[in-house]
Amino acid sequence: MLPMTAAAGDEASLAGAWQLPEGLVLLRDTIRRFMREEVRPVEERQPHDAFKLPDVDLARLQSRAREMGMWCFASPAEHGGGGLDLLAQVVVAEEAAKCRMGAYVPACGAFGIDPPSVIWLGTPDQIARYGVPAIERGQKCFVAISEASGGSDPARSIRTRATSHGDRYVINGTKMWITAAAEAEWGIVFARTGEAGDRGGITAFIVDRTMKGLTTKEIPVIRSYSPFEVHMEDVEVPVENRLGEEGKGFEICQRWLVHARVPYAAAVIGIAQEALAMAIDWVRQRESFRSLLADKQAIQWMVADSEMELRAARLLTYQAAWQAMLGHDIKVDASIAKVYATEAAGRVIDRCVQMFGAMGVAKELPIERWYRELRIKRVGEGPSEVQRMVLARHLLKG
């Protein structure tokens, strides 16, 4: 097992020069090597827009990752996961995203897919029935919050309703933009059990994919894989599948979203950094008007601006992760990291397209795919405007 967490005594190094502790440097380099030597050779044999690896290849990579102790990094070690703290998750997320499929699933799924972290807030029975099997079997799961009525303000936009009937709830409604819903074994659905517009009227439920009345429908989007519409018609969920107390679902939702935004930010930094490295290699060998592109000031400024923005985004993301490790509320820090990283990465990938010229939009390279997928990142996990609103409200309240 790799050393995966930062010790409390490393606070000074991170707060000062932002040097990663030795254990995290080792972890980063191990992930980087695994991506280069194991994952990319398999991915390069797949079609440009592929978002899955062949089963035999994925099984081999996952077996290798398990042997190295690199499995479901964010899940608790006592339940079979890697037990990483948030800073270590950030380090992994940045490196594991450096592949064509990185915007969808890190390392093409080689390290497994962590179940939603809020499952570990559940009862021992829920953890045993859902959390642990998800890790052991590599199951996919979904989280269903957004609806057609809106996703950025779940406290008011959720219309899906769960009605109590003794030992069970009956859920009716439709969720939108749900990742992996068609392949998932189970998911966490947020439904209204109280009055409309009331934060205290939302409850979380664990819903099995096989429950009668649950159907999914693909929603095509600009990237190579699609989210889904999840429709529930009289879906009966036993009361033991209620996650947390009735009416406490909004707090669970917020907890999941806030912490998820930090590795999310790190992943887009990784993709943009890889794109920039490719663009630098390109301009150092490509000639135009009797000189290398790298010798032209316009290109030099694109490279310089991109590197500065990525460094700033990385520091903001590390800061948010470190504050979480210290036990602080990171709602504002996570919003800052998410909005800055996704917008900076979008600008970087746009410059990379420009530096590559026609090759930047050709499917021979991953640049154009990353361009499409990074555009979505400014919307997912809470759009930029919502993150700015969170920050502004915090500042204006004094």
Image: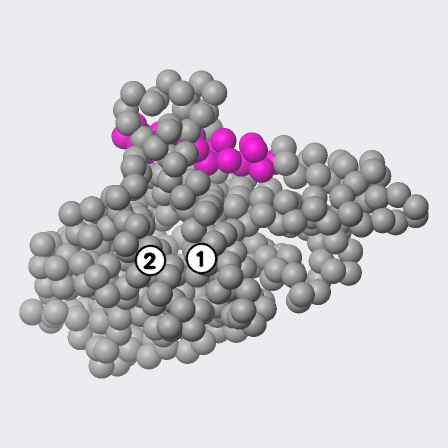
Q: Is residue 353 left or right of residue 308?
A: right
The amino acid type found where label 1 is placed reads: Glu
Q: Is residue 152 above or below residue 219?
A: above
The range drawn in magenta is 309-329
**Mark 2 to mark 1 CA distance (whole Å):** 9 Å
Q: Is residue 102 left or right of residue 345?
A: left
Residue annotated with mark 1: 38
- Give the residue drawn at x 47%, y 20%: 17
Q: Are marks 2 and 1 in contact (CB under 8 Å)?
A: yes
* Depth check, front residue: 239 or 1: 1
Residue annotated with mark 2: 64
The quarter of the image holding the N terminus is top left
Q: Is residue 331 above or below residue 139?
A: above
Q: Is residue 281 visible?
A: yes
Q: Label 1's element?
A: helix
Task: First in sequence, mark 2 or 1: give its number.
Answer: 1
The amino acid type found where label 2 is placed reads: Arg
**Residue 246 in the image, given as x and y percentages of width and height:** 16, 55
**Residue 140 in the image, given as x and y percentages of width and height:** 31, 65
